[in-house]
Image (cartoon, helix red, strand yellow):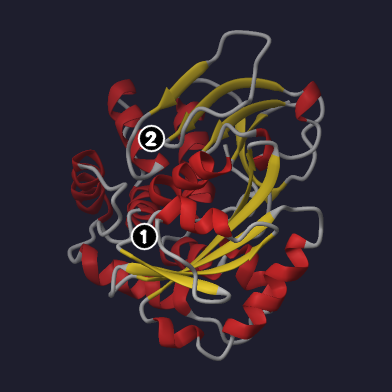
Amino acid sequence: MSALVLGHMNPDTDSIVSAIAAADLYSKRGFSVAPAAQGEPTPETEFVLRKFGLTAPRVVKDVAGKELWLVDYSDLPQAPAGMDSATILGIVDHHKLGDVTTSTPLEAWIWPVGCTNTVLKNMYDFYGVEIPKNIAGAMLCAILSDTVIFKSPTCTEADKKAVDALAKAAGVTDVKALGMEMFKVKSAVEGASMKDLVFRDYKDFDMGGKKVGIGQLEVVDLSILANVKDGLYEEIRKVKGEGRHSVFLLLTDIMKEGSEMLIVSDDPSVVERAFAVKPDGKSVWLPGVMSRKKQVVPNFEKAFK
């Protein structure tokens, strides 16, 4: 039986493309593996898969008794059901080391870079395996997505170097044009439900023993969200009511390079403690804040202590 290469809950482009790329690499190293995902692709991810002729991984909700390679996460709140009886063979990630534990040694590549696919590009190089052209194109898009076309503070020189090499391998001549095309798809909200928008890029965290949800919508212009902002706020109120202390939704303007954060919390003052800015009613503008991983989660973790 093949082991599963599996990304986090509410998968984004990095999570799904990482599963595809890692499964390709592991299989060429002699392992029996298959890519999987914990949900269907977002519109952005569908665009990337379609553009480069790739198929979305099958959706898996329970991994009891299975062997796993984790990509793009190592936190139990991001894992599927059945993890207590699964065997973890390895981790490839660019986030902090989470609370996943193993009963046997594992192969781990966890780097402080902007995207898991940057780590995977270096793994292909390390093992001397050539990246297929279509997978190289998808990996390139994943890095552009996670680094917000190099605007995110999580972006490193390693990410830019990986993009240069992947663009050559994929035959992409204008990287930034591809990134903007992708973000226009990502910005589209027409026809999507409020729940789909909130969970398009959403994660739960344990902060000081409290369950805290943080979602993010990245758009080329915040005016795109003007007509749905009230609906988004009502939706995160519902999400909070499912047993969370707080839910925050980042509405990120990639051109203005900042985020408006919608706030629903048992203790709204935690926002001021985290960012030294007092919220204006239901929201707060955070100039320069582009990254949930680097600029939001660490601040809240300190504020919730």
- Disc 2 target residue: 120
Identify residue for label 1.
Answer: 290
Q: Residue furthest bottom?
A: 227
Asked if 25 appears above or below 196 in the picture, the reply is above
Quadrant holding the C terminus: top right
How would you rate the neighbour count of disc 2 (Cα within 10 Å): few for under 14, some for 14-19, many for 20 or more?
Answer: many
Alpha carbon separation for disc pair 1 and 2: 23 Å
Name above or below for residue 87 compared with residue 60.
Answer: above
Residue extending farthest to the top is 104
What residue is at 81 percent from the left and 32 percent from the top? 82
Circle count? 2
> Residue 298 at what x, y percent from top left?
45, 42
Q: Amino acid at mark 2?
A: Leu
The image quadrant where one finds the N terminus is: top right
Instruction: Tell me: residue 30, above or below residue 165.
Output: above
Q: Residue at x 60, y 61 (%)?
A: 268
Point out residue 61 in the picture as x, y percentages from the top left corner: 77, 45
Residue 241 sits in which quadrant?
A: bottom right
Q: In this rendered view, identify the residue nearer to me: 148 or 291.
A: 291
Residue 41 visible from this viewpoint: no
Q: Secondary structure at mark 2?
A: helix
When asked about the image quadrant of residue 238, the answer is: bottom right
- Determine crowd level at label 1: few under 14, some 14-19, many 20+ residues with C-alpha closer than 10 A: many
Which x, y percent locates residue 81? 79, 38
Kind of residue indicated by mark 1: Met
Residue 173 visible in the picture:
yes
Q: Position of residue 213 (x, y in %)?
A: 64, 54
Q: Earlier in the sequence, mark 1 or mark 2?
A: 2
Q: Residue at x 57, y 87 (%)?
A: 190
Q: Nearer the viewer, mark 1 or mark 2?
A: 1
Q: Helix, strand or loop at disc 1? A: loop
